[in-house]
Each structure stands twice: as structure tokens, then as C-alpha cells.
Amino acid sequence: MKEIARVMVLLLSLTLLWGCGAILIGGIGAGLGVGAYRYIEGSVARVYPLAYNSAWDVTNKALANLYMSVSNSINEGVKGTITAVQKDGTKIEIKLEDKGQNVTDISVRIGFWGSRKDAERIHEEIKSAAGLK
């Protein structure tokens, strides 16, 4: 009986951990360059070869280029959040985090559920504003 219980716990553990492997693999792929995206829980994240302060300025410039109004921004020097609104009233949340050595992780979430297409459009504008290929 104990043997069956152990097998059930093992199977349940593997089932619960299955998604973690996909996130880990996505995180590893994101470190390969500016072209790699991570899509986690409705947010699209990308790693940029930019110092945090430059990434902050470029992100604000990209939002202005897309005619999106910033409603709130919190810059803590090594991480920050920018809340903006699209023309149609959809909320945008952008999180920046300094990863050191002139690398910044930028995560974009559009609306409640997240729109991958719209988030990638903002990332493309950030990349363009930064002069990255």
C-alpha cells in the first residue's frame, strides 16, 4: 500500500513540476539575444543589452512614439514599473529590471489577459527607439 502511495506522490509531483521546465527553458532561450521573447502568464518579456537608465528612457520614448499616455511610473533605480493606456483605453503595464552588466529585462503586459501581439509591437518599438537590430 505504501508503494502505491509513493508512486502517486511521485506522479503528482511530476505533473505539478512539468510547467516549471517550460518556463526554465524559455528563460534560458531569452538570454540568447534581443530577438528572443519569453511569454509567461500574459506578459511578453525580452532581455535588452542596455543599461537600466537607458532602457527606462527608451521605453518612455517608445510609448510616446506609439501615442500611448503614461498614467503612472515608478523608477526605483534598478527596477521600475510604467503604467500606460492605449488609445482604446486598454491598460499597459511595463516592468523593467536591471540584470547587471548593461542588461535590462523588460516585461510588457497588455490588458487583463495579456495580448502577445500588442506586447510584441511595443517591444519592437523599444528595440527601434534603442537603435537595436
Image: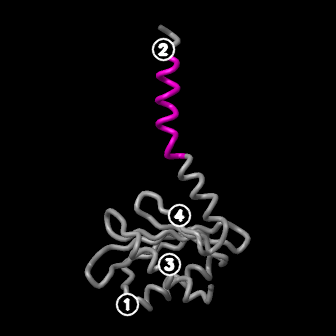
Query: Which callout, 4 or 3, points at the residue further toward the start of the chain?
Result: 4
Relative depth, front residue between 90 and 35: 35
Identify the secondary structure beneath mark 4.
strand
Q: Which mark is residue 123?
A: 3
Is residue 99 within the magenta segment? no
When asked about the image quadrant of residue 114, the answer is: bottom left
Kindly state the secondary structure of the residue where label 2 is placed.
helix
Would you say the residues marked 1 and 2 are in contact, meaning their CB atoms lie under 8 Å apart?
Answer: no
Q: Nearer the viewer, mark 2 or mark 3?
A: 2
* Mark positioned earlier in the residue sequence (3 or 1): 1
Of residues 25 and 95, the one drawn nearer to the viewer in this rendering? 25
Query: Could you tell me the amino acid type at mark 2?
Result: Ile
Q: Position of residue 52 (x, y in %)?
A: 62, 75
Q: Compute the Cα span from label 3 to label 1.
A: 15 Å
Seen in the image, is 49 located left or right of residue 6? Answer: right
* Magenta-tinted stretch: 5-20
Which residue was labeled with disc 4? 38
Give the residue pinned by disc 2.
Answer: 4
- Of marks 2 and 4, which one's residue comes earlier in the chain? 2
Q: Amino acid at mark 3?
A: His
What residue would you read off at disc 1? 67
Q: Main secondary structure of the magenta part?
A: helix
What is the spatial separation of the Cα atoms under label 2 and label 3, in whole angstroms? Answer: 49 Å
**Label number found at residue 53:** none
111 and 95: which one is in front?
111
